[in-house]
Image: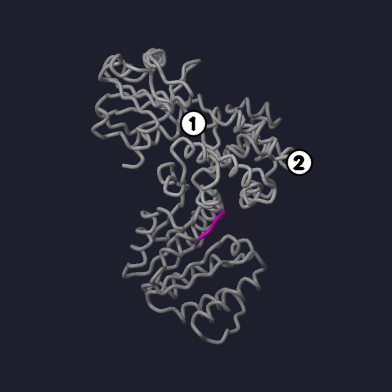
Amino acid sequence: MFYNREEELEALRQEYDSDSFSLVVVYGRRRIGKTELLKKSCESRDHFYHLVPQDSETVQRGRFVEELADHTGERTPRTDDWRDAFDYLAETLEKDTVVVLDELPYLVESSDSVLSDLQWLVDERLDDSESTLVLCGSSISVMESEVMGHESPLYGRRTAQIDVQPFTFGEALEAIDYGFEDAVRSFSATGGTPMYLTAFDYDKSLSQNLLDNHLSKNSVLHNEPEFLLRTELRNPSRYMSVLEAVATGYTTPNEISGRTGIDTGPLSQYLRKLRRLRLIEREIPVTADRKKSKRSIYRVADEFLRFWFRFVEPNRSGTEQNPELVLENEILPNLDGYVSETFEDVCREAVWKLSGSDELDGSYSKVGRWWYGEDEIDIVGLDSQNSAALFCECKWTESPVGFDVARSLEEKADEVRWRNGERTEEFVLFSKSGFEEGLSDRLGNRWRLYGSESIEELFES
């Protein structure tokens, strides 16, 4: 099934409907749904879709010309190079055809001239047409540097680019068929990648899905991170060590260095590369200056990878011998502790939905975590225009939240150095297991309380 992506579809449709030539670059990680997006966008349109094989330049060009000849119903012509092949493409195109070259990085890897030949195609043969050329790829580094970068022959020619991102929790709920609590747990193991979401059979329990998909050595997901990293990296082993360190709680550069044995100098290069590939992210306190702050920590940016490096990779030998034992002894007893971080992200997404609504007084354009010394607040929102601050605590526990949590949050809020003395303040408690009786009346009108049902309703609205 095809889920969401309405904004991306609309962007593509606008390019297809343009009265002039369009060059669109679509990129994003493996399994993120780029191909399904492009196929959906081309429905009911004259289009030629070509998936580039991972093969030699001669085989790639031969396949391209053969498929194009099949598309037009002509005999396959002889071509000596890519310029010949693209010339044949231009000759056979209808004036408003959509042409999709999927997995373009395979062409870039096999041919030194293909980008220059594409430049010739765009400048000399298609510029006066109403057609659209879509270049798509899973290698983010190749697409950003070699296709769109300043030194690329195609630089400055694209009319649109679409960076296909994983689904948010709210978007993923369209595919997840569990109740709210298991939906959060499930999302913590799949993240928002469509292929991972749809690998689960939601008629089965979450435990069975973890066993079938993450722990079974015959499943696609079992070795997926290694394949993902090899898309971008020739030698991924050290990058995997960094990801495992971060996923298991070593979040500062010094901690990561100590865990992996990689000196802090070289480590900065690994971290920079992983950030560029959106596999990890650098986080600073929400009140800090991103360029100046030295209080940064790192976290794995994708829930599926965080789960895999937290539970699967460290137990690889166990999953080969007895995956059921790994599930029972290593994953299930620690799952809710792990999911608590996912729940914070879900609640942060809920804050974005609430911000500017009637339920909150402020309109918070800056939302994130805050910490200083031993103090930490799960979510802080800042409304600079109205000098308003929002403070939130997120509890994924079996016990209802009581007054002690609220009092602690107020005390920590006093330590947040942002427009002290002039700001207005409001508070939110998010709790999986609800709240002690009478807590809302005791706290007053500056407070909002959201249990599981209330949070679920926010995402359904």
Give me the residue at 60% from left, 43% from top: 208
Q: Amino acid at mark 1?
A: Glu
Give me the residue at 36% from left, 67% from top: 16
The local secondary structure at tag 2 comes to helix
Looking at the picture, how far across and down is residue 204, in whole percent?
55, 46
Q: Quick check: 106 above or below 366?
A: below
Say which mark, if any, is on residue 312. none
The local secondary structure at tag 1 comes to strand
Mark 1 vs mark 2, foreground winner is 2
**29 sits to left or right of 15:** right
Q: Which residue is mark 1?
A: 283
Name the residue nearer the viewer: 74 or 124.
74
- 137 falls in the magenta region: yes
Measured Cα–Cα span from mark 1 to mark 2: 37 Å
Marks 1 and 2, the one that precedes in the sequence: 1
Give me the residue at 54% from left, 49% from top: 201
The image quarter in which residue 114 lies: bottom right
Looking at the picture, how far across and down is residue 53, in whole percent?
62, 66
- 105 falls in the magenta region: no
The image quarter in which residue 127 lies: bottom left
Pointer 1 local density, CA inside 10 Å: few below 14, some 14–19, many at least 20: some
Q: Amino acid at mark 2?
A: Gln
What is the quadrant of the C terminus in the image?
A: top left
Pointer 2 local density, CA inside 10 Å: few below 14, some 14–19, many at least 20: few
Say which mark, if any, is on residue 321. 2
Looking at the picture, how far across and down is residue 225, in whole percent?
63, 46
Name the residue nearer the viewer: 436 or 46.
436
From which residue to which does the magenta span run?
136-140
Give me the residue at 38% from left, 71% from top: 44
Looking at the picture, how far across and down is residue 184, in whole percent?
48, 37
